[in-house]
Image (cartoon, rainbow, N blue to C red):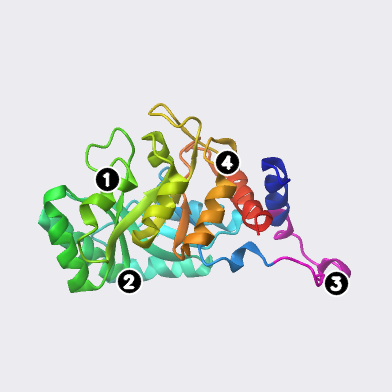
Amino acid sequence: MNTRRSFLYKGMLGIAAGTIVNIPSIFAKPSLSEKPKAEDDSFKLAVAGYSFVNFNLEESLKMMKKVDVHHLCIKDFHLPYKSTAGQIAAFHAALKESDVTGYAVGPIYTKTKKDIDNAFDYAKRVGVDLIVGIPVHDDLVYVAQKTKEYNIRYAIHNHGPEDELYPTAESIYTLIKELDPRVGICFDMGHNARAGHDSIADLQNYSKRIFDIHLKNITVATKTGATCELGRGVINIPAFVKMLRKSGYSGHCGLEYEKDMKDPLAGIAESVGYFRGVCEGTR
């Protein structure tokens, strides 16, 4: 039986292997029975930009390079909302140099329709087709109208039991199920579990409207639960990965690491290695 330790061990070996050069070909030659790599999954490992709230873009990209992750959800502290075309071009050039793609913007909090207009304009200028947002309930129909106008998807983020607007994936789905299908969910699996919900079951139940995932684990499945390294919490990550495959999820899994946020690299590396080990070990 595969254990959390074996998953972590496999994953960390994968990270270490990426740093080794000039390996003799006898060791690089795959066997006929070798399993597909985790990267062959339809879902893509990413980092949620908030993980780097205490770091500038250059420092953030260096950490992503160390853990060999190539997708980023863009936060405004790295690319301000009022950025010029030149600043946006320079931002994308920096990402390209580090072999990173910015696939979405947000989370973006909005309180007015003007805020929503600005969010869609920002996403269009940045060149992404997904906004992660937190609108007020009264503006949901307007959000749906904007998704049609711009053909940009909008994923509403759930923030757990403290969030009066969207505590869980279910609370979002109930409000959006009759809206344009370009309005969906950014599924924060950790906050969902903190609100007393089964994140694996909810992934299955709402997968058709889940456009993005904030990948995290928590210490306990209650309001007091804190974010921890991916392999150390109460959410069954191997079962979650199996459900990603079963549900046909093809979006990003953005690791949102909120522990030790002033010194996150070790925890991010452990979590990335564990996730890759799970993906390989559960095939």
Percent x, y for residue 238? 59, 48
Q: Which sits earlier in the primary sequence, circle 2 or circle 4?
A: 2
Q: Amino acid at mark 3?
A: Ser
In this picture, which residue range is highlighted in magenta?
Answer: 15-35
> Does the residue at mark 2 contact the one at mark 3 (Cβ under 8 Å)?
no
Percent x, y for residue 106? 32, 54
Q: Amino acid at mark 4?
A: Gly
Q: CA distance from mark 2 to mark 3?
A: 41 Å
Question: Circle 2 is placed at which residue position?
Answer: 127
Give me the residue at 41% from left, 68% from top.
92
* Label of residue 171 in the image: 1
> Does the residue at mark 2 contact the one at mark 1 (Cβ under 8 Å)?
no
Q: Which sits earlier in the primary sequence, circle 3 or circle 4?
A: 3
Q: Main secondary structure of the magenta part?
A: loop
Which quarter of the figure has residue 282?
Answer: bottom right
Q: Amino acid at mark 2?
A: Gly
Q: Is residue 55 visible?
A: no
Q: CA distance from mark 4 to mark 1?
A: 30 Å
Give me the residue at 21% from left, 72% from top.
150
* Label of residue 25 in the image: 3
Toward the viewer: 182 or 203? 203
Q: Decide: is 9 above or below 259.
A: below
- Work out which quarter of the rendered image holds the C terminus and state it: bottom right
Q: Decide: is 90 above or below 19.
A: below
Q: Decide: is 198 above or below 156.
A: above
Q: Amino acid at mark 1?
A: Ser
Toward the viewer: 277 or 128? 277
